[in-house]
Every structure is written in C-alpha cells, then in structure tokens.
C-alpha cells in the first residue's frame, strides 16, 4: 500500500477544533494556514497524516461547490422550467439542497439539481412519464422471476484521460477498472488495449495499469475493451426455503473481513450499533434482519448525489444520520448494519450498464445460511419504492439485474500496483485514476475525464 493510500486512512482521526471551525465557516485559506503552523511542530504520525490529507481536501473542496444562489436556481430551471426561487429556499431549509460557505458566500453543490430532478413530482413537472414500471429493468426482472435465471455476454469499452486543460507532457501512470471474477461474473476476455499489466481476475480492486511517457495531447486516453458474462439466479429468501446448494457456488467463502470493521469508513459507531439493534429487534432470522436493514435504507434514506467521498467522514453514519446518500453510501450503510448484526456482508462496485448509459454504481452482497451469497441494491430498491413498484423493490433484496460490471469486490482495497499520490477516490476505483510522476499535486476529479460505453450484449 502506498504512502498516499495509508495517509487516506487517517480520515478517521478528528480534526483540531479551530481548523474545523475555519473550514465550515468557509475560511479555507485560514484553515490551510493553521494546518501549516501545526505541521511545523512535532506531532503524532496519525495526526500529521490527517492534517496533510485535510489540506488536500481543502484544495479540492471548492470544485464541488461552483454556484451562487442565482446560478443554482437557474440550473434547476433548466431541468424543471416552472421551478421557483421560493421553492429553492424551502428545499434548502429542509436540508434537500447541499451548500457550504466559501469566503462568506453560500455556494451550492455541483449536482444538487440532478438529485432534485429525480423526485417523482419534479419528473412530472419536467414532462417525464412516471408510471412505476421501468421499460428497461422490469422485463429482465420478470424473466428472472419466471425462469429462475438470466445472463448476458457483455462487451464494454472504457477509458480515462487527463482533461486537456490539465495535461502536461510527462511520465504518467494510469489505473483503469476492468471486469473481475465474482459470484455472478465469469469468462472475462480482454479484447483490445495495450496496458503494461492487468491485475489477477480475483483481485479485490481489479484494474489495468499503464506506465507511459505521454507528450502528445491526442494520446491522453488510456483505453480498454473487454467482454464478460454476467448471470443472475433468482432468490426470494424472505418467502422461500433455502435451496439444497448455494445459488452462486463460485463465490469466495465467508472470511473474517466480511464481519469486520476497518477505518476510516467501515466503522461500527455507537449510533450505527444502536440503529442495527433497534431495527433487528424481534427478527426471527438473518433473512428478516437483513430485510429490515434493506427496508430502512430504501424507504427512509433519500437518494442524493454526493460530493466526493473523500470529503465526507464516516460514510455509513453520515447516511444514517442525514438520511440521504447515493448508491455507495446506501450500500455501505446496509453492509455496516448487517455486519454489526453478525450477518456477513461485502461490497461490489463497477458500473450499471444500459444501451444509452454506462455509469458508476455500487451495491452489496450479504450471506444467508443455505442460500450463500446474495445481493442487495438499496439505491435501485429505493428508486422502485419511490416510484410505486413493490415488485422491483422486493427484487433488489436478494437479486440484481445482470446488466452490471463488477470491478471491485472490497471497499478500501489498494490499487495494484499502488498509487503514490492521493487518489481522486482513495477507496474505490470505478472511473480510473491517473498520476503524473513528479507532479507537486495530485489530480482532482474535475481534471480527469472518464468514458464507458456498451459495445454489445447478447443473452446467454
């Protein structure tokens, strides 16, 4: 593990109070100055690492909050034309619009409007049809429930590049996620691309790796095309007895990590322990306990696009306290509640794959006796709940649709080979990472461009 990855794990160390006050007052320059003064002293290594990491967080934070109030209202009106400034103020007062102060001015989160535009009432006002049925997902779900399984052979092309404005000729190292062997994913073939190395198929964060000198801006993208098979077998653990054999016999067996906490983000905080105990009280089985955790996340947590995870402390607890989060925060909260209750649970992430969109996505696995490893996708389940689809809501407890790419099988897994600089996302590689050897500062997320496209798919 590199120094940068080790330092990122210091995020569970609290910040000194005066720096925290400066940060949330919007005095980022003052906070950075205070950090430099502290770093000049003799400090314990964990606190020193935390302060160095915090200085990088402060550098990146303004890129997440680009708009003033007038600009933010205008962005929302681009999606919902009759949206009003009064609505904006009401939603902000109810905690539904993320902002912070920068230099004494309120600045609004770059994707707050994308969150609001997903709400059913906003979709209707934008002229979108909200009928509770997905033309893409529900036919697949119907087939899986009727036939017991469904699989596809999927071909993906993805790339990562330094955006043109941030590019300088030099020596680059790049890591691009690639399909990994997993419970539901197999027969992986690399079709094109020229990486210097590719992680083993069972790597916890599988990636292709390049180490190149790049002088021509046209040669910036690092690109890979690959094919794999994804197959889902139907599970209904709440209402059916366990099968004679686990549905996914190729899944890795339960290990101690599947019940463990690990700083900085997989922590069993007092609040999460109390929440898990309350939700599980009186449940007669692991299946019922896991369902209660899933039901809490899918019905009580609002889907919300989030600032970079690097900017948030204790992701699972953040989701449980604020009752909002995107797919990753929701999956982590489900995993933590399960582990606290003694139910083994794991992370999976990569992409959700559709003909017109391939995007980063996260979900969970949990283990039930007899069934073996099953799946839970709280964000897809929550979307189904909000849109009035109880069948789809129930399906994503125990199952996935097969149009997924798994690249990561563990949260907080290091890259292979390790990255020297602090990563854009220190704990999950879904879009790719790049560093320029010898650069004074690491790239931010706004300085990298990633693309992914579904080239083809066929039913198995």
Image (cartoon, rainbow, N blue to C red):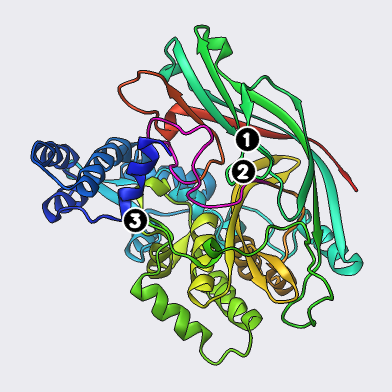
Specify the segment rendered in magenta: 406-427
Q: Nearer the viewer, residue 76 or 228?
A: 228
- Report the residue marked by disc 1: 199
Report helix, strand or loop for mark 1: loop
State yes or no: discs 1 and 2 in contact (Cβ < 8 Å). Answer: yes
Residue 358 falls in which quadrant of the image?
top right
The reply to whether callout 3 and callout 1 are in contact (CB within 8 Å) is: no
- Quadrant of the drawing holding the N terminus: top left
Residue where numbered disc 3 is placed: 313
Query: Is the stretch drawn in magenta largely helix, strand or loop?
Result: loop
Q: Which residue is mark 2?
A: 203
**Drawn side of residue 186 relative to residue 219, left or right:** right
Q: Dot 3: few (<14), some (14–19), or many (≥20) neighbours within 10 Å?
A: some
Under circle 2, the secondary element is: loop
Q: What is the spatial separation of the Cα atoms under label 1 and label 2, in whole angstroms? A: 6 Å
Q: Quadrant of residue 243?
A: bottom right
Circle 1: is it few (<14), some (14-19), or many (20+) Cα within 10 Å? some
């Amino acid at each position: 593990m590199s120094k940068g990855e080790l330092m990122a794990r210091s995020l569970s160390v609290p910040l000194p109070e005066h720096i925290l006050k400066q940060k949330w007052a919007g005095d980022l320059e003052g906070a950075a100055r205070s950090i430099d003064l502290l770093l000049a002293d003799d400090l314990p290594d964990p606190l020193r690492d935390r302060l160095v990491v915090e200085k990088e967080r402060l550098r990146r934070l303004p890129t997440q909050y680009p708009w003033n109030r007038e600009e933010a209202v205008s962005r929302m009106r681009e999606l919902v034309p009759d949206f009003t400034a009064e609505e904006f103020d009401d939603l902000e007062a109810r905690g539904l619009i993320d902002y912070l102060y920068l230099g004494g001015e309120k600045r609004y989160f770059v994707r707050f409007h994308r969150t609001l535009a997903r709400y059913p009432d906003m979709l209707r006002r934008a002229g979108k049809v909200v009928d509770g049925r997905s033309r893409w997902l529900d036919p697949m779900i119907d087939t899986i429930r009727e036939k017991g399984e469904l699989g596809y052979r999927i071909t993906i092309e993805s790339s990562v590049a330094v955006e043109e404005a941030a590019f300088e000729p030099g020596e680059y190292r790049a890591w691009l996620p690639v399909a990994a062997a997993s419970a539901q994913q197999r027969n992986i073939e690399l079709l094109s691309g020229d990486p210097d190395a590719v992680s083993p198929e069972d790597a916890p964060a599988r990636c292709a790796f390049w180490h190149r000198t790049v002088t021509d801006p046209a040669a910036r993208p690092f690109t890979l095309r690959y094919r794999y098979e994804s197959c889902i077998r139907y599970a209904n653990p709440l209402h059916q007895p366990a099968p004679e054999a686990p549905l996914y016999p190729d899944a890795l067996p339960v290990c101690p990590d599947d019940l463990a906490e690990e700083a900085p983000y997989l922590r069993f905080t007092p609040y999460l322990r109390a929440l898990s105990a309350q939700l599980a009280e009186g449940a007669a089985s692991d299946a019922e306990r896991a369902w209660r955790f899933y039901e809490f996340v899918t019905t009580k947590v609002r889907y919300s696009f989030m600032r970079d995870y690097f900017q948030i402390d204790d992701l699972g607890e953040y989701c449980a306290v604020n009752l909002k989060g995107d797919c990753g925060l929701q999956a982590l909260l489900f995993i933590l509640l399960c582990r606290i209750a003694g139910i083994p649970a794991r992370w999976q992430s990569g992409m959700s794959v559709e003909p017109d969109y391939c995007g980063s996505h996260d979900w969970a696995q949990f283990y039930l006796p007899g069934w073996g490893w099953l799946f839970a996708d709280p964000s897809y389940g929550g979307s189904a709940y909000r849109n009035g689809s109880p069948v789809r809501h129930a399906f994503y407890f125990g199952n996935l649709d097969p149009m997924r790419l798994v690249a990561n099988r563990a949260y907080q897994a290091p890259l292979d080979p390790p990255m020297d600089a602090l990563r854009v996302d220190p704990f999950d590689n879904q879009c790719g990472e790049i560093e320029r050897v010898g650069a004074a500062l690491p790239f931010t997320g706004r300085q990298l461009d990633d693309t992914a496209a579904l080239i083809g798919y066929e039913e198995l």
